[in-house]
Each structure stands twice: as structure tokens, then as C-alpha cells.
Image (cartoon, rainbow, N blue to C red):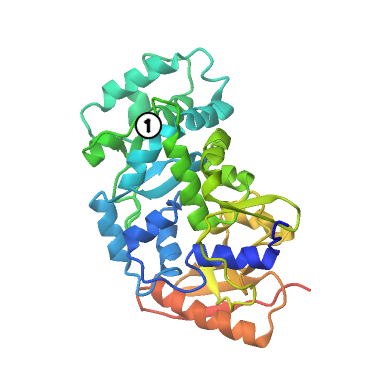
Amino acid sequence: MTTVLSTRALGRATLARQLLLDRSEMPVLAAVGHLGGMQAQEPQEPFTGLWTRLRAFAPGTLSDLLVGRDVVRIHLMRRTVHLVTADDAVAWRARHDAMLRGKVLGVYRRDLAAVDLDELAAAGREVMADGEPRTMAELTRALAGRWPAVAPRALGEMLISALLPMAQTPPRGVWRQKAGVRNVPLASWLGRALDPADPDGTDAVGQALVRRYLAAYGPAASADLRAWCGLAGLPAAVAAVRGELVSFRDARGRELLDLPDAPRPDPDTPAPVRFLPAFDNAILGYQDRSRIIDDAHRGVSVAGIRVVLLDGRVAATWTVTDATVRVTPLRHLAPAERDDVAEEGRRLAAFLSDGEGDRIEITTPAA
């Protein structure tokens, strides 16, 4: 008989894999790698995501890694901007090519119907050959004469997020810095060529993605894996590594795969209060998010709303203004829960204000 894992058991496994059950001593670069990257279209959010996961996290460490080109901001999983290690960017980017093109065409197919994408890519590479960072507007202005009837936004989105592997350069993504998006060819930025797609069709990268995903998100179904990376063509990779894996079922009867020695804590393991940033992959990395968020609140996970975990589940949202963290519960909080949220919220306020304040306000949920 296949073991059935309860929703609570899956939640505790997620917390352990996501470094949310106990703050980790893992170095920052290793943590970004372990998580398979961090969704980062909101440039400052990864700092909160690492603060809530790592002991004694210093934001300058992540900034230094970005400036030093050990981590990069690129369009990758789900065509969203992710902060990933340079090694993962080099290894994974080609495997995402078809998905990235498809995602852009899903939005701009009519605009790009008359555009030869190979010709567009060649023209874009010519403009970017000097290695100088450019905004999307600067790039599309340089190409306007070639495709005058095509909306510049469509050309730019296809070039920057799909056809040309690009890195977003600092100071965007640096702690406390506000800066627009400037793009540079990824290979030029890193000083090394990107790994090509597997020529023999074995999809070693796809197999590596399966293992890496399960290490940070398992146990999980194939649909969860697709929801995380956006890649449709991974059934063969899953089949190739299946012999290395163990199998479970969830309460809905779905098959869940996992690495045999990965942590699966007791469902009654205490789970501390954790403040998650907007678009955190601990929630978005699954098709079925019920292990961590109630269906009634699923919408907050895709709306860029920051959330608070209580006993391992989303129980409140939070914002910050003038060094004050404001928490809005999604359900009634017992006095002890409010105390725990307030204590962790004060730590977060101090972190976000560089120690200048630790104020927190918790509202009363509507009846």
C-alpha cells in the first residue's frame, strides 16, 4: 500500500525543505541554489525571503553576490524574473528557451505574426554585441526601422525575456537601491558561454531540475513541478529518474514523488511564525497549494501580497510603512498567536529599517 501523506505532513515537509521550519546556517549563495532560485520581479523581496530563512542574514552579502556576478536576475521559471546562482543560469537557460518563446507568443502572437523570430534575434544580438546594458526602450528604438509596424513592447518582450538570454544588471536588486531594468547579454555578463541544449535528447538538465525541485519542494506531483518551472516537456525526465525516487499519495489520491532521504518531519513538529515576501515560491512552487494556504485565500498568493505563516499555514497578510509592520489577520488570532506574530514582526521591522525601528500593528479581522 502506498503511504498517504496528510496535508499537514506535506506542509511540514515544505517548511523543512524551504528552510522555514528552522532558520538555516546555510551560506547565502548556497541557499539561493538550494531553493532553485527566488522569484524576484519585486527587486527587494528576496532580502526578506532570505532573512526569514537564514540565521544572521546580512543583506549586504546578497548585494555583493549580485554585484560580483555570483547570482543574477534573469527571466527563467514561468517567464518571471528569478534570482538564481550564476551556475544555474548557465546550466538551465537553454532548457527554458521554448517555454519562454511560447509564453511571450501567448501574449503577443498577433503582434509578432509577421516577424521572423530568428531574424529578430540576430538583429537584437547585433545591437547588444558591444556588451553595454540597455533598457528595453533603448533596444527597441534601435530596431524600430526594421519592424516599424510592430508594437515596440512586443519586440522588446520577445527579445529580452525569450530570444536573447539576458541578465538584469545592478544596481537593480541591490539592497535599498531603486533602479530601472537594464539588460545585458547573460554570457557577456558572466564571462562564460551558456550550456547548450542536450544534443542527444537525454535531457540531463530536465532530470537535474526534477531532483533539485524535489529537494526544495517535495514530496510533490508532476503537476506541481510544472507549476514551478513552467516547462511542459518533463515527463521523460521524471520517467528517467523515477527509479531513484519514492512514491506517496496525497489526500486527493495524487501520486507524489520524492527523494528517498529528504526530510519529511512529523506532522506535529512545531512551526514558528514566518513572514514571507511577495510571490514567494514556497507558495507559488505548487499547482496544489493547499499544503500551505487555504483555497479561500489562494488569490493572495498571485497578487503580490506578502503573507504570514502561523502553524505552517497562511493566516495573515502584511505590509510595511515608515518602519512599521502592519499585519492583517485572515482569521481570528488567539492571544498567544498575536504575541508570536508581534514578536517576529518586530524583528522584521528592525531588519527592514536597519535597526531604526521595531513597530508592529496587528488589526482585528472582520467578523
Say whether residue 186 is visible: yes
Q: Is residue 216 above or below residue 121?
A: below
Say which of 279 and 324 sits in front: 279
x and y percentages locating residue 218 in the rendered image: 56, 56
Q: Is residue 235 above or below residue 324?
A: above
Q: With 365 as the anchor, is 41 left or right in this view?
A: left
Q: With 274 as the anchor, is 196 left or right in this view?
A: left
Label 1 Cα neighbours within 10 Å, binned few <14 / some 14-19 / many ≥20: some
Q: At 57% from the left edge and 65% from the top edge, which residue is drawn?
A: 13
| Residue 11, picture quadrant | bottom right
x and y percentages locating residue 105 in the rendered image: 54, 26
Q: Is residue 232 above or below residue 177?
A: above
Q: At 34% from the left edge and 28% from the top edge, which residue is drawn?
A: 139
Q: Is residue 34 above or below residue 331?
A: above
The residue where tag 1 is placed is 137
Look at the numbered disc 1 and give the secondary structure of its residue.
helix
Q: At 69% from the left edge and 69% from the top edge, which residue is drawn?
A: 330
Q: With 351 as the anchor, is 326 left or right in this view?
A: right
Q: Which amino acid type is shown beneath numbered disc 1?
A: Ala
Outermost residue toward the right in this view: 367
x and y percentages locating residue 179 in the rendered image: 34, 49
Quadrant of the rendering where the C terminus is positioned: bottom right
x and y percentages locating residue 71 in the rendered image: 31, 51
Quadrant of the rendering where the N terminus is positioned: bottom right
Say which of 134 and 282 sits in front: 282
Say which of 211 and 100 sits in front: 211
Q: At 40% from the left edge and 62% from the top edge, which residue is drawn?
A: 47
